[in-house]
Image (cartoon, helix red, strand yellow):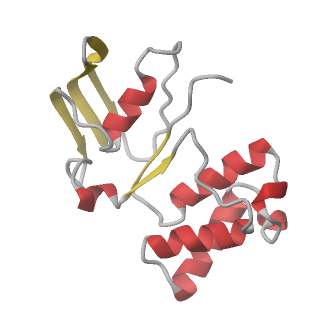
Amino acid sequence: MLTLTNVRKSFVQTVAVDGLSLSVGKGELFGLLGPNGAGKSTTVSLAVGLLSPDAGGVVIEGLGNPADPAVRRRIGVATQALALYDLLTAEENLRFFGEVYGLSGAALSTRVAWCLAFVGLTDRRRDAVGTYSGGMKRRLNLAAALVHDPPAAARRTNGRR
């Protein structure tokens, strides 16, 4: 589903990724581990089209280049920085993000319910996100990345446990 071929990315004189090739199949879960500065966040940013490689290529099978805005709309990304509104409930947050992606009506309600169950927050769906623990917020952030049922999804972290 996701293929990076001989990808290189540098920033001024710092080479962040050099000659990386990898393939992640549909339904596979893939993690990048390494110390700070190893190029993990850069690799994820390349994979989802937030950065363009200096050399090599990135393709999401069936969709194309993730730098294409039409393809990028079909990708779900849970970034290191949380993209949530503390004053809204979990349900309201997911409805908001679902509407941003064009969902409405029964389809939106179904996806919100599925996402809340997937991340184990159904029982807290009506609580303001500001009352959540850090781990609960991370799970809801993942749900927000998946609410539009993207064919390609990624999670970007800072590599710390």
Residue 75, image quadrant: bottom left
* Residue situated furthest left in the rendering: 55
Residue sitting at the far bottom: 105
Query: Which residue is outermost to the front?
Result: 12
- Number of marks: 0
Q: Percent position (x, y) of residue 83?
A: 58, 53
Residue at image coords 83%, 64%: 124
Q: Is residue 106 left or right of residue 90?
A: left
Residue at 78%, 66% in the rendered image: 122
In-front residue for pair 75/118: 75
Horizontal and vertical percent for residue 157?
56, 32
Q: Quadrant of residue 127?
A: bottom right
Q: Which residue is drawn at 21% across and 31% down?
A: 53
In the foreground, 11 or 78: 11
**Residue drawn where x is 53% and y is 12% of the image:** 35
Q: In this view, does 47 lie above or below 128?
A: above
- Give the camera-side residue of 105 and 12: 12
Is 141 located above or below residue 127 in the figure? Answer: above
Image quadrant holding the N terminus, namely: top left
Q: Is residue 36 left or right of residue 15?
A: right
Location of residue 64 in the rendering, given as x and y in whole percent from the top left corner: 20, 51
Q: Quadrant of residue 4?
A: top left
Q: Quadrant of the C terminus?
A: top right
- At which x and y percent is residue 71? 27, 57
